[in-house]
Image (spheres, rainbow, N blue to C red):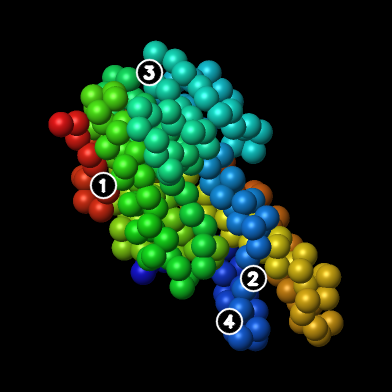
Amino acid sequence: MLLITIPRNLKLFISTLRAINLKSNNIFYLDINDYTRRHNEVIRCLHLLHLNRYKFKYSKRIRSHSVQEILDNEYAEIRVDTRIKTDVKIRNNRPDIFILDKKKNKITLIEVGIISQDSLQIVETEKLRKYDLLANELGLIYKCSVEIIPYVMTWDGIVTKYHKSHLKRLEIPMNVEAYIQSIVLKKTVETISFDRRRGLESGLNAEESWERASIGVIMRSEMHEEPIPPLKEAKRKEDGVKILKPK
């Protein structure tokens, strides 16, 4: 597993989170609402990145961006969390992001996961295989190649050794990756800070110290410059990514 390069002002945040976890017997509870918030923020960033790449007329400001389920133009069709119709009934037919590149005649299925470190490798592998049947069917329907790319990291920014190749296939610049990671980390510190205020952790001095640290990190992460997604397309290596070509 690797820890990707992150903004320097977030190192305090990560070390503080891990210190809190050690004092709590390494237990960090992530309920469905916490997961959904992180998950949706990552999708929002990836969605805007691809809208600009495929020349949709949209704002380049991530914080003001709202995701629409289906968008279509002469370059691409992009769907978010919608069921994909196929001739054969398929259970897993709702990928996080579906992209049909009309110029390259290629479909990309992106599946996002923000999880605990214990589940990192398992979840990434599951997400890579989850849409095998859908990818095969889409390849037959559209007569094009289909690739499945997982975008998975832990709540504190740890990724697998395959994550770098996934970034290359998605053509995510490092400044965009750093921004996404800062958003995930910010949502994590907000959750823990809220839980501690509700009294789930004891110790007034520790509470005050954590609050000061977390507030500082949140403010600094909000100052992190929002990236402008590039429109340039480039050929990338295909290692670590599942690609299915039409028969």
Q: Element under label 4? A: loop
Q: Dot 4 corresponds to which residue? A: 26
Q: CA distance from mark 1 to mark 2?
A: 32 Å
Q: Element under label 3? A: loop
The residue lying toward the viewer, choosing from 170 and 40, is: 40
Q: CA distance from mark 3 to mark 4?
A: 47 Å
Examine the image and state in which quarter residue 34 appears. bottom right
Other residues around mark 4 within 10 Å, as few (<14) / some (14–19) / many (≥20)? few
Q: Dot 1 corresponds to which residue? A: 242
Could you tell me the amino acid type at mark 2? Tyr
Give whichever of discs 1 and 3 has the lower sequence position.
3
Q: Dot 3 corresponds to which residue? A: 75
Q: CA distance from mark 1 to mark 4?
A: 34 Å
Residue 35, x across and y down, in percent? 60, 56
**Quarter of the figure that contains the C terminus:** top left
Residue 171, x across and y down, in percent? 35, 40
Determine whether, in the image, residue 24 is placed left or right of residue 101. right
Q: Which is closer to the viewer, label 2 or label 3?
A: 2
Q: Which is closer to the viewer, label 1 or label 4?
A: 1
Q: CA distance from mark 4 to mark 2?
A: 10 Å
The residue lying toward the viewer, choosing from 10 and 63, is: 63
Q: Dot 2 corresponds to which residue? A: 29
Q: CA distance from mark 2 to mark 3?
A: 42 Å
Other residues around mark 3 within 10 Å, as few (<14) / some (14–19) / many (≥20)? some
Could you tell me the amino acid type at mark 1? Lys
